[in-house]
Every structure is written in C-alpha cells, then in structure tokens.
Amino acid sequence: MSLEEKTARRGRRSRDKVASGGYDTKTYRQLKHPYEPQKVFSDDEVQAIHDTALKVLEELGIKMLLEEARSIFQTAGARVHDDEMVFIGRDIIESALKTAPKSIRMRAANPEREQDYALGTMLFAPGAGCPNVTDLVRGRRPGDLESYEETLKLQQAFDVMHVLGPSSEPQDVPIQDRHYAQMRAQMIYCDKPMFAYSRGQAQVDQIFEMIQLGLNLSSDEFANGSWAFTIINTNSPRLIDRPMAQGVIDFARAKQMSIITPFCLSGAMAPITVAGALVLQHAEALACIALSQLTKEGAPVSYGGFASNVYMKSGAPAFGTPEHIKLEIGSGQLARLISLPWRSAAGSAGVANDMQSAGENHMGLWGALMANATVTVHAAGWLEGGLTFGYEKYINDMEALQTIAELCKKPETGFGGMAWEALAEVEPGGHFFGAAHTMERYQTAFYEPLVADLNNHGNWIEGGSVTSDQRATKVWQDTLANFQLPVNSGDIKERLAPYISTKKAEGGAAPLD
C-alpha cells in the first residue's frame, strides 16, 4: 500500500479534526511552569560556579573582535589589551545584573499572542537555523523561501508554539535581501513574537524599520516592549565575534531583546565536566549581558545557554543525553542565582523521524521542564543537530509539547473531582464507562492526541497500518492546505511592498563579516 493510500485511510477521529477546520483547537498561551525547579548542584556549588566564571572574566578574559564593544568596556573600566582581549571586573558584572530587567514584554501583532518573558514562564520556540528541510513526500533538500514560509505557517498554526524562529534558511534569496523576505513572511503569515537575525547594523536597522512600518507602530510604541528578539551565539571558548557583539549593541540601543546563548559542547568547545562547561557558559553569558547594559541600562536581555556533550568517538554533538539534562538543570540554577529569565534548548542528533530523534528531544524537553526554562528553543522539528528541519518530526514533537502544556492545567478537585457520586454508583467489580459522572465529562476529560493512534492492533491494521510519521505527513499537509492568514495580513503586505522594493533596488544590505 502506498503512502498516499495509507494516509487516505486514517481513522475517523483524524478526519473529524480536518472537517472541523484544523488540528489545533486548544489554547496554550501564557503558560506557567507547573512544578518546582530541580537541582543538580547544591546552593554552595552553584555559587562557586558563578564565582569561578567571574574569575574567568577577570583573569583569563574574553576576546572581542568588535572595536566598538571593546571601547564600551574600556569606558566602563575594563582592561582592554592590544590583542583584543577584554578583562571584565566583577563590579561591572554586578552592576549589569542590577539593571537587566527581570521581566520582558514580548510584543506581537496580535495582543493575545504576547508573552511575559520572566522566570516561571514556560515558552516554546521551534527548531531553528536549519540549512536543510525534509519530509516523506519531497525528501531532504536545501531550505528555500517556500520551505521557510511553510515552516512559519506550521509555527503559526499550533498554539503551543509561542514564538517564531527561522526553521528553514531561504538560501534561494540573496543574502543582502534575505532579511526582507524573512521579516515580510513573519508579518504576513504570523501574529506571534518575531525573531530577527543579527547580521550587522545595516540589516538590523532595516528590520526594525520594517516592523514599525508593517505593524504601523510609532517610535514610542516600538520602544514599549520587545517586538523582535535575536539569538546571540558566542564562539566558545571565550570569543565574541563582530556580528554577535554588534547584535548585542544594536538590539540594546533599540530596546529589543537579545537572548544570550553560548553553545558549549562539553569535551569540544567547553571543558569535559558538567561544572566546567557551565563555568564557561556562565562567563560568556555574563560578558554579553554586561555589554547590553553598558550600551543601554535596562535593555531587555536574557540569560541562556545551549550546552550538551559531544560523542567522543567522532566529535559530533549529542542531545538528550544525561549530561545535556544536567547542564539544563544547572543552567536554571545559575539563572535563578542572578534572577534573570533564561533560554534552554532541546533538539536531536538523529537523522530521521524515529525513536532516537523523538527520545532525544523528549529528554531535552523534560530537562527544560525540570530546569524551569523560560523558553526552550529547538523544541520541535530539529534533526541532525540542527542541519535539517523535519516536517513530520515537527508534528510528532507538537504532541510532546501539547502534553507538557496540559500539565499546566490543575486537576479538578472538590466534590466533582473526588468523584464520590461515581464511586457510590458503581458496584464492586463493575466499570465506570456508563456512570453519570463519566458521561458528564468524557468528551473533555482527557487530552485528545494530535497524531498518536490509540487503537488496538486489529483496528490499526484495518485503518491501513499507518505509522506515526505517516500520520504526521497528513497532519502537516492538511495544516498547510487549511492555513488562514492572520487579521491585517493584507494591510501589512501592502505597507511593506514599496519599502522592500526601494531597498532592494538600492542594493539591499550586506551582512557584517
């Protein structure tokens, strides 16, 4: 039986979902962590990691390739050497932590999609930065504008995906024009908090102009909250390149959020021990947080890290490992020590939408849950350590995210929750299927799976023996086919058109090397 025949014979439950107008009928907004954060280190050990990171900044220093960044630190009293090394005193770090905001309003075209970015908030962001995409229908291929727009539609369609991200890189668009296509697509197809690359001041300035123009914002409205966020990746160990340092400065001056993300792979770009990797991550993050606050006090900035280990037999990155989870929990402890919201990450090294990739991502998600991450990036769709975004993988990961989101709902208690009437009604050895208590609640009592098949083996065979990834194919196909543009999409498109046309005619904006 062909894939098309199998997906056409899916169960009645899934057909009803399509007929009702789509798969996502739930609301998972403004989620709060349902459980207390866990610990992997004692309080004294966390303080020692923090103190050692400060010692790294003071005695070993950070190499900063951007002259402006070095000048900002030198003016603040840091020692700057001719070899581009910057030695940052703990007084500078302590001052920065005092002015860095503890809560950041993530603005959106749709006010109902806005989020408060703070400790205790639970947000999910998609797998991002992937040069390739893959699905069961079209196979693995380089990312292009079509796939970039498709993945944005998938992000928009599911409520549990709270913020946007560049799941696919539109490589068929020239690099000097790519930011126009990326921001235009986000504003036309989505109404959630937006992402922007930091690829030099010229592009960043134009991105901010597009947001104000497209959403019809005044300068004061644009400065009131963060309308876009960027990811700042340090080049571990102890190096901040020119585009990333410039990004911190540009976003700080515009009062837009930078999420600082050292990518510390233990055993490769970071010490092989969990505590040692966290010392490096913490030092690099603190340096960038300080740069943002020295640029503009109170600028929205997030602590963060993406730390895991490598497979020592090949050097390849690994995810969802015990070390990855310990690093997540330790990162959460460090974030709470400095009282800042923070970013974690899930992801998978698997090359297919299989048990390995699902298990790795699930473990990363559970680590972020135990760590109380403010936002978990690469929460859905990430394959091959970020080299590929999988459409079926994204849909299967939605199931995991929606399951976690359901944990935020407090179970019913009281007289109805304790089910006294049902317990009294059902005789010993009986069943609760037909009890009045069950009949009142059965339609909404349990989570309705998005893609999982809960039928027995016989019914599964009768339904075409469709596997999870094949069912996921039908879900993403239907989601794209039934996609509806957000309100005001047409107005935004019309306002942006002349701006983009003019800027492209002028040659676009080259990224910073």
Image (cartoon, rainbow, N blue to C red):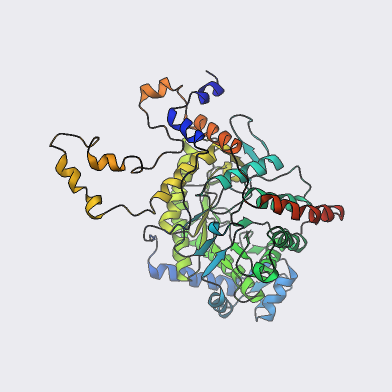
Question: Which quarter shows the C terminus?
Answer: bottom right
Q: Residue furthest right?
A: 506
Q: Quadrant of residue 75?
A: bottom right
Left or right placement of residue 355 versus residue 510 in this view: left
Q: Residue furthest left?
A: 428
Residue under the image location 38 percent in, 59 percent down: 38
Q: Quadrant of residue 442?
A: top left
**Residue 375 seen by the camera:** yes
Please, is residue 133 above or below residue 81 in the view? above
Image position, residue 273 (x, y; %): 48, 57
Image position, residue 110 (x, y; %): 58, 57
Image position, residue 17 (x, y; %): 48, 35
Task: Compare residues 444 and 162 and report the one nearer the observer.
Answer: 444
Please, is residue 123 above or below residue 74 in the view? above
Residue under the image location 16 percent in, 34 percent down: 430
How many numbered marks are there? 0
Image position, residue 190 (x, y; %): 62, 50
Task: Compare residues 58 and 461 and report the one nearer the observer.
Answer: 461
Task: Compare residues 314 and 18 and report the one nearer the observer.
Answer: 18
**Residue 80 seen by the camera:** no
Left or right placement of residue 38 versus residue 49 in this view: left
Q: Quadrant of residue 507?
A: bottom right
Task: Compare residues 249 and 41 and report the one nearer the observer.
Answer: 249
Residue under the image location 36 percent in, 24 percent down: 457
Please, is residue 176 above or below residue 65 in the view? above
